[in-house]
Amino acid sequence: MRHTRALMIFAAGFGTRMGALTATQPKPMIRVAGRPLIDHALDLAVAAAADPIVVNLHYLGDQLATHLADRPVLLSWEREKILETGGGLRHALPLLGPGAVATLNSDAVWTGENPLRQLDDAWDEGCMDALLLLAPVAMATGHGARPDFSMDGAGRLSRHARTGGAGFVYLGAQIIKTEGLRDIPDDVFSLNLLWDRMSAAGRLHGLIHRGGWCDVGQPETIAQAERLLSGTADV
């Protein structure tokens, strides 16, 4: 039987790069192929049997909460201030429960194998503190040309150096152990801080996604995402 894993969907951000599209609605409510981005993310979560599913909220969060009212999710409100990925994940831990959790960004679309199932199949508790889903730069539609990580032959990740050869883009899906969040004193911080500590210990690992992906971060990437989903994209 496949392991059932808690999942955090990040949906609290301001979406400023979307310009006028996020002036009156939160970014996860932007429609791609006729459906809000958050619904694309929830499809993946439900298909992977994630339980519980937690969604964090901040910017125009009431709209998102209303949309999710009849969906099988728990809401982690960041009412006073947005906590970024690390602070947001730590804030949601009472809802997520103990053990390693999956996280998924809500501002992307996927084709091919379910990213959450792919991560769960490859997760190795013994040697990994986090497992990040990646793609080569050329396959990361909508992202741009800058890679995030280099990966060695054993799948361990380090920050990509400009002179370091081939690099990979983080696609916004991972499994991560959360114990290290307790050691970070800040309220607001990125998961990059925890990843760097894991990388230094040789316990940050990567996995190449078997399928397509598009970052829906700017207005022009909506059309790219729709072409990907329709099977007409160049990648």
Image (cartoon, helix red, strand yellow):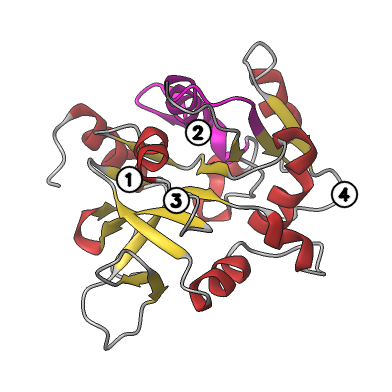
- For this orientation, the residue located farthest to the right is 80
Task: Looking at this view, name the residue that lies furthest to the bottom.
Answer: 163
Q: Which residue is mark 3?
A: 217
Q: CA distance from mark 2 to mark 1?
A: 14 Å
What type is the residue that disc 1 sits on?
Answer: Cys
Horizontal and vertical percent for residue 52?
Answer: 64, 26
Q: Secondary structure at mark 3?
A: loop
Circle 4 crowding by C-alpha within 10 Å: few under 14, some 14–19, many from 20 = few
Q: How far, Cα to Cα, is label 1 from label 4?
A: 31 Å
Q: Which residue is mark 1?
A: 214
| Magenta extent | 26-54
Q: Are marks 1 and 4 in contact (CB under 8 Å)?
A: no
> Which residue has dot 4 on it?
80
Q: Residue at x 72, y 60 (%)?
A: 181
Most foreground residue, 100 or 33? 100
Q: Quadrant of residue 23?
A: top right
Distance (Cα) linking label 1 and label 3: 9 Å
Q: Which residue is drawn at the image coordinates 50% and 56% (left, top)?
A: 130
The kind of residue on which mark 2 rests is: Ile
Q: Of the two numbered discs 1 and 4 on the same chain, state the one appearing first in sequence.
A: 4
Nearer to us in this view, 185 or 139: 185
In the rendering, at what x and y percent does residue 127 appear? 46, 59
Of the numbered discs 3 and 4, the one sitting upstream in the chain is 4
Of mark 2 and mark 3, the one earlier in the sequence is 2
Which label number is shown at residue 30? 2
N-terminal-most mark, 2 or 1: 2
Residue 69 lies, with reference to residue 206, above or below; the image says above
Q: Secondary structure at mark 2?
A: loop
Residue 31 is one of the magenta-drawn residues: yes
Between marks 3 and 4 in the image, the one whose residue lies nearer the viewer: 4
Amino acid on which the number 4 mark rests in the picture: Glu
